[in-house]
Every structure is written in structure tokens, then in C-alpha cells.
Image (tube, rainbow, N blue to C red):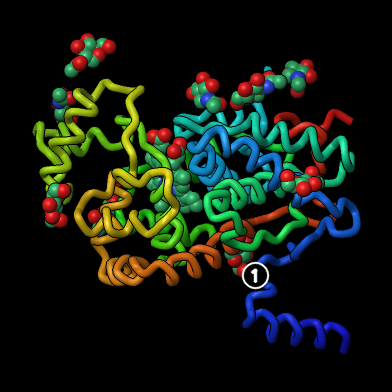
Amino acid sequence: MNVNILLVACVVSGILGACQGGQLRKNFYKNTCPSAEEIVRNVTWNHVSSNPNLPAKLLRMHFHDCFVRGCDGSVLLNSTANNTAEKDAAPNLSLAGFNVIDDIKENLENKCPGIVSCADILALAARDSVSFQFKRSLWKVLTGRRDGTISRTREALINIPPPVFNFTQLKQSFASKNLTVHDLVVLSGSHTIGVGHCPTFSNRLYNFTGKGDQDPSLNATYAAFLKTKCPSLNDTTTTVEMDPGSSLKFDTGYYATLKQQKGLFQSDAALLTNKGAANIVQELGDNDKFFTEFAQSMVRMGAIEVLTGTSGEIRSKCWAVNSN
Ligand code: HEM
Ligand SMILES: *[C@@H]1O[C@H](CO)[C@@H](O)[C@H](O)[C@H]1NC(C)=O
Ligand SMILES: *[C@@H]1O[C@H](CO)[C@@H](O)[C@H](O)[C@H]1NC(C)=O
Ligand SMILES: *[C@@H]1O[C@H](CO)[C@@H](O)[C@H](O)[C@H]1NC(C)=O
Ligand SMILES: *[C@@H]1O[C@H](CO)[C@@H](O)[C@H](O)[C@H]1NC(C)=O
Ligand SMILES: *[C@@H]1O[C@H](CO)[C@@H](O)[C@H](O)[C@H]1NC(C)=O
Ligand SMILES: *[C@@H]1O[C@H](CO)[C@@H](O)[C@H](O)[C@H]1NC(C)=O
Ligand SMILES: *[C@@H]1O[C@H](CO)[C@@H](O)[C@H](O)[C@H]1NC(C)=O
Ligand SMILES: *[C@@H]1O[C@H](CO)[C@@H](O)[C@H](O)[C@H]1NC(C)=O
Ligand SMILES: *[C@@H]1O[C@H](CO)[C@@H](O)[C@H](O)[C@H]1NC(C)=O
């Protein structure tokens, strides 16, 4: 009987989205560390106020965390003598902001030691950093994640979709995390902030099919500009804004960029190669729609394969597992 009531409650409230996060819940630290979320926000905002590139770094870091072994803070772990960690895998190009997570963790350990997980810190810091320019929270973050103890470079290579993926491959990658095509198009909107390094798209400029050609789906005017930024396939240091002229502003610019055939990666352009996805691209040009949908998809991404209850641990330092 009790089980049935619970089931019914979950199904009913599930319609309202309350069961999306599984075991996660709103304000998990309310009793154990009441100021936790405020501390995360304050420390994050302090850092962002002097480094406007940080929101892109932390948002991408959260994505990489969630797509490898779930949102368990495994992306934060450093390599050891015996193990090469996720953060040292090739897709880490420009992963950054680890020092911010460490700073937040230190503040939290001073206030309430051993309570707040690194996985939750990352989820909150990603939200708060992106929200800084609005001075309000753009999406809700359910909490109660616990930290994993394993981080393997090989798993990052398998699970992080590369920028050359076509639509079918992207759809499959997201489906393997129980995310839909809708989530794919919405979350790709993250590329409204931040930059990409030349090697992540230069193949589209110089040798697309191995005949010294250019990707025909890339705006030719824009391709000419990109060639001036990345003069050869060799350039590994230069970066280019993904949403030209508006790469610090979290807005719907990404979708406008896509429609002008200026999506930087093949994975961006790929969203126009499927009818359903292209329709979603059209819809998300609307500001209110994008912010609403983004908030919902982030909650779903933030719930991927989370460790809760007594699984995993609460790390005392985010870059290493507890030694016991
Ligand atoms: C759909 C599949 C995706 C692919 C193939 C992809 C690929 C990439 C690549 C290649 C970069 C450039 C990295 C560099 O050169 O430094 C990048 C940057 C970025 N990605 Fe994605 N991404 C995807 C989805 C996502 C999602 C779901 C999010 C967040 C929810 C995200 C957030 C970001 C952000 C914020 C940056 C900018 C980072 C910076 O400025 O340093 N991406 N992405
Ligand atoms: C967070 O920052 C606000 C504004 O600066 C301050 O009033 C508040 O005391 C800070 N909270 C914590 C927990 O540090
Ligand atoms: C852990 O790795 C980060 C970069 O990923 C580095 O900045 C930091 O110094 C490392 N920490 C330790 C204690 O080795
Ligand atoms: C690394 O591997 C060696 C030999 O297998 C082992 O003795 C050592 O305890 C391991 N170190 C860690 C940190 O796991
Ligand atoms: C990224 O990985 C490379 C090795 O592939 C490593 O040298 C570098 O320190 C890593 N970057 C970060 C930020 O961890
Ligand atoms: C996408 O890429 C896969 C793997 O390379 C390939 O088999 C498939 O035909 C491609 N799909 C489309 C629609 O191009
Ligand atoms: C996706 O959902 C299925 C069925 O609920 C579940 O067994 C699986 O673990 C989920 N996968 C991920 C990555 O969340
Ligand atoms: C372009 O690709 C072809 C086929 O992979 C290769 O033979 C050629 O060397 C490449 N050209 C350049 C400039 O990298
Ligand atoms: C690319 O780099 C290699 C060696 O690093 C160099 O020999 C070659 O000239 C470079 N190619 C271009 C087009 O700059
Ligand atoms: C390509 O870019 C140019 C210059 O920004 C723009 O005027 C044009 O409309 C774009 N082409 C398409 C197909 O959107």
C-alpha cells in the first residue's frame, strides 16, 4: 500500500517534473549546511566578476562531468601515478576553472566540513556563473549528488561527443544518456558563450573531404574570415568565438548564428540536417522559449547517473579521492 502511494505520488508529481532528478532534491543541504548554496554563489560571482570567460568554462566542465560516469565530479579528479584521469584526455582542450571549484570547496569545508559534494559544487557553480550577468538563477539545481572515485581518460574519449559528429551520431550520444533530440538542440545553445580552438573546426576550412576543399554547409564569407584566424591546420592555440560578437552573452545568438550557416563545428551545423531538429532551432530563436527549455534540459543533464544516498563519498578535496 505504501509503495503504491509512493508510486502514484511519483507518477503524479513526475508530470510536474519533481521526479526528474531521481534521488536529487531541492536544497538538499538546507539542514546540514544552510549557507552552502549562498557560499557557492558568492565565491563563483567573485571569480566571474574578474573573469568573464569563466561561465563558459564551468558550463562545459559540468557537461563533461555528466557525460562521463554521470555527474559525479569525476572530471575534477587529477591523474595519479597509476591512472590518467578524464581531465587529461584530448577532449579537455581548454577545460579550465578547476581553481574556482577548489576555492569554493575550501570555503565550504571551513563552514561545514565533509558535507557538500564536489559534483554538487560543480552543478551549482555552472548555474551561478552563467547566471551572474542576470543577477538571478537561470535554472534550478537539484542537489544531493555524491562524488565518484573513478576517473579514466578512456571513458572521456568514448563519451564526449567530438565536434565532427553528424546528426545521427549526436542523437545516439545523447540517447545513451537518456537525453532527447530536443535536449540536444537546447543544450547545444550553450555554444552561445565561449570559444573553440582552431583544430576543432579547421578541417572544415582546408581539407573537408581530403581534396583540399571546404565544408559546403559553412557560410563561405564566414569561412574566409575563419581562415584568417586559423591560417593552417596546424594552429593549436588560436581560439574563435562560437557566437561571433556575442560570445560572453548568454542569449539566443547561437541559433541566429546557425541559421546564417555560421555554426562553428560540424556538430552545430548538423542540427540543421534533420527536419525535426531544424524546427527546434527555429523555435529556440525565441528568447523566453530558449530560457525555459534550457532550464529544463539542464535539470535533466544534471541528473545523469548521479550517485546518491550512501553511494560514492563526499570528497574533502575536489581533485583527489579521499584516502581514508
Ligand atoms: C552536442 C555535442 C557537443 C559537442 C560536439 C561539443 C563540442 C565542443 C567543442 C569542440 C568545444 C570547443 C573546445 C575548445 O576548442 O576549447 C566546445 C566548447 C564549449 N561547449 Fe560544447 N559541445 C557539445 C555540447 C555541449 C553541451 C551539452 C554543453 C553544455 C551544456 C556545451 C558547452 C560548451 C561551452 C560553454 C563551450 C565553450 C568553452 C570555452 O569557452 O572554453 N557543449 N564544445
Ligand atoms: C554573500 O554575499 C552577500 C553580498 O555580498 C553577503 O551579504 C552575504 O553575507 C554573503 N553570504 C555568505 C554566506 O558569505
Ligand atoms: C590538479 O590538476 C589541476 C589541473 O587539472 C592543477 O592545476 C592542479 O595543480 C592539480 N593539483 C594538484 C594538487 O596536483
Ligand atoms: C600504484 O601502483 C603500485 C603498483 O601496482 C601500487 O603499489 C601503488 O599503491 C599504487 N598507487 C596508488 C596511488 O594507487
Ligand atoms: C589536458 O590534457 C593534457 C594531456 O593530454 C594535459 O597535459 C593538460 O594538463 C590537460 N589540461 C588540463 C586543464 O587538465
Ligand atoms: C554519420 O556518421 C556515421 C559514422 O561515420 C555514418 O555511418 C553515417 O552514415 C553518417 N550519417 C549521415 C546521415 O551522414
Ligand atoms: C536511462 O534510462 C534507463 C531506463 O530507465 C536506465 O536503466 C538507464 O540507466 C538510464 N541511463 C542513463 C545514462 O541515465
Ligand atoms: C588532405 O587530406 C588528404 C586525404 O586524407 C591527404 O592526403 C592530404 O595530405 C591532406 N592535405 C593537407 C594539406 O593536410
Ligand atoms: C605544420 O607543422 C609542421 C611541423 O610542426 C611544419 O613542418 C609544417 O610546415 C606546418 N604546416 C603549415 C601549413 O604550417
Ligand atoms: C553568410 O554570411 C554573410 C555575411 O555575414 C551574410 O550576409 C549571409 O546572409 C550569410 N549567408 C547565409 C546563407 O545566411
Question: 107 above or below 270?
Answer: above
Which percent across, then down, holds residue 85?
61, 30
Residue 78 falls left or right of residue 158: right
Name the residue: 57% across, 39% down.
48
Which percent across, then down, holds residue 314?
82, 42
Residue 2 falls left or right of residue 223: right
Question: 31 above or below 236?
Answer: below
Residue 31 falls left or right of residue 227: right
Helix, strand or loop at disc 1?
A: loop
Q: Please state which of residues 93 and 8 is positioned toward the viewer in this rendering.
A: 93
- Asked whether residue 98 is in view, the answer is yes
Name the residue: 38% across, 38% down.
195
Rendered-image quadrant of the C terminus: top right
Q: Residues within 10 Å of mark 1 (few under 14, many from 20)?
A: many
Which percent across, then down, holds residue 182?
42, 68
Name the residue: 20% across, 55% down.
260
- Three-letter code for the amino acid on which mark 1 is drawn: Gln
Is the distance from the Cβ of mark 1 to the nearest ligand 7 atom less than 8 Å?
no
Count how many numbered circles sit on residues in the image: 1
- Asked whether residue 82 is in view, the answer is no
Question: 214 above or below 139?
Answer: above
Question: 142 above or below 207?
Answer: below
Image-quadrant location for residue 9: bottom right
Residue at which label 1 appears: 20
Rendered-image quadrant of the N terminus: bottom right
**Ligand 1 lies in which image quarter?**
top left
Which percent across, then down, holds residue 174?
46, 58
